[in-house]
Amino acid sequence: MITRYSRPEMRAIWQDENKLRIWLQIELLATEALVKEGIVPANDFAKIKAGAEKCFADLKGLVERQKELEKTLNHDVIGFTTAVAEQIADDASRWFHFGLTSSDVGDTCYAVQMVQAADILIADVGTLRKSIAKRAREFQFTPCIGRSHGIHAEPTTFGLKLALMHDEFGRALERLERARAVAAVGKISGAVGTSAHLSPRVEEFVCEKLGLRPAPIATQVVQRDIHAEYQTALALVGASIERWAVEFRHLQRTEVLEAEEPFTKGQKGSSAMPHKRNPITWERLTGLARVLRGNALAALENVALWHERDISHSSVERIIFPDSCTLLDYMLSLLIRLMDGLQVYPENMKRNLALSLGMWNSQTVLLALIKKGLTREAAYNLVQDAAMKTWEVKHAGRDDADFIVQLKGTPEIARHFAKGELDKLCSLDFHFKEVENRFKKLGL
């Protein structure tokens, strides 16, 4: 699985040692709250706490014992409570897991893990945006052709392209922050959520200590629309990564080659063709975004459970939560590396800009003619005719095709412009006059 490529900090969140550590913390907090409620004797809680400390000190051993017990019990939480009880002196263990149901522990743990994972992902996006901002400023006024339908449109700058990327990942950051807040919900309200056996004060105490808020109401489980929203947020961030992976894949095509992913020393591009430098990393990101979307769909399927709960969601979540969080962490880390090392070729951008023979000025001339009194239809026809004649000259094999020359050679157009006016109008400066203001507005 791709999880092995993610950072150790993210993987650690979803490992059994961390899960059982959180389970143990939840159980201890619940028992401590029961002492405050006058249900559990303080000396018994001291024994429970001492036994728990042994488990905290050897989480690997606790995991191994829990798994061993689960083989017979066929229940992970009972395997856990039994393993912990073995470390608690006398009969004080009877208070361990008192009044709780498995999902009180499991769902509250999921909330803690989702928050922990979100914190890493939020930091990832923050680092990514710094990298993008740096490259955007570097190429703020580097001209390149803008494309619609893959066809030359009007000039833009490579810096503006990256500024757009920076802005999009600003929204990704907001989505992750919202997802973190949405997911930070715990529940300690019992078998069907009625708090029949535990006072809501116990739930409030546990959740507050864990940095969570209690679910206003729950069944045996926290409702899965919360988890689906979290997964959907991850998928949306993945979709943004894919959007830019596709952009840079196109820019790396041989015929374009305006930007290229890093090609490291010793790297091979093809088993058959030694010359190849393929956009494999961008393609990898494109494919992995599909996995995130698939996991989000599975999370949506988990929303509809039978009555107060079933466990059809459980097996799914054991896969999609660690996989999606570790996968997105990996994707963001990879994207940071790509942006830091992105090879940019301004000369190729200049070459490609020239391929449309100045016809990227067509709208500028169209609007200028309208301002001079022509109807839109008349102006459009004149400019389009000049553009089509420019293409005809090009396709005839001549190397003197030039849109501006055609405009000046068309009396119905030329008579509306003073000497030098068209040249001044048909310039990159005209298109880039708001670039600096745009960067200021974006805080770049």
Image (cartoon, helix red, strand yellow):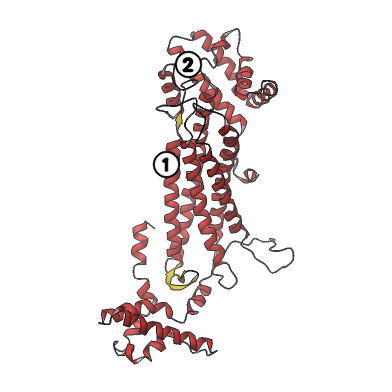
11 is higher (above) or lower (below) than 258 = above
Q: Is residue 9 visible?
A: no
Q: Looking at the picture, how far across and down is residue 98, in whole percent?
A: 52, 14
Task: Name the amino acid type tagged 2.
Answer: Glu
Query: Mark 2 or mark 1, which is nearer to you?
Result: 1
Q: Is residue 437 above or below residue 70?
A: below
Q: Does 294 appear above or below 243?
A: above
Residue 109: x, y in percent? 52, 29
Total numbered badges shown on the rendered structure = 2
* Relative depth, front residue between 246 and 334: 246
Question: Going 41% across and 46% down the picture, which residue do you hit?
Answer: 174
Determine crowd level at label 2: few under 14, some 14-19, many 20+ residues with C-alpha closer than 10 A: many
Numbered tag placed on residue 178 in the rendering: 1
Q: Position of residue 412 (x, y in %)?
A: 32, 90
Quarter containing the C terminus: bottom left
- Please name whichever residue, 325 or 376, is drawn nearer the observer in this view of the structure: 376
Decide which of tag 2 and tag 1 comes sooner along the chain: 2
Residue labelled with disc 2: 32
Residue 232 image offset from top left, x and y in percent: 49, 44
119, 96: nearer the viewer: 96
Q: Residue at x 55, y 72 (%)?
A: 256
Q: Nearer the viewer, residue 205 or 50?
A: 205
- For disc 1, the neighbor class at 10 Å (few under 14, some 14 to 19, many from 20) is some
Picture residue at 61% right of the left edge, 10% below the top? 89
CB-based contact (under 8 Å), mark 2 and mark 1: no
Q: CA distance from mark 2 to mark 1?
A: 31 Å
Callout 1 amino acid: Arg
Determine the image quadrant of residue 56: top right
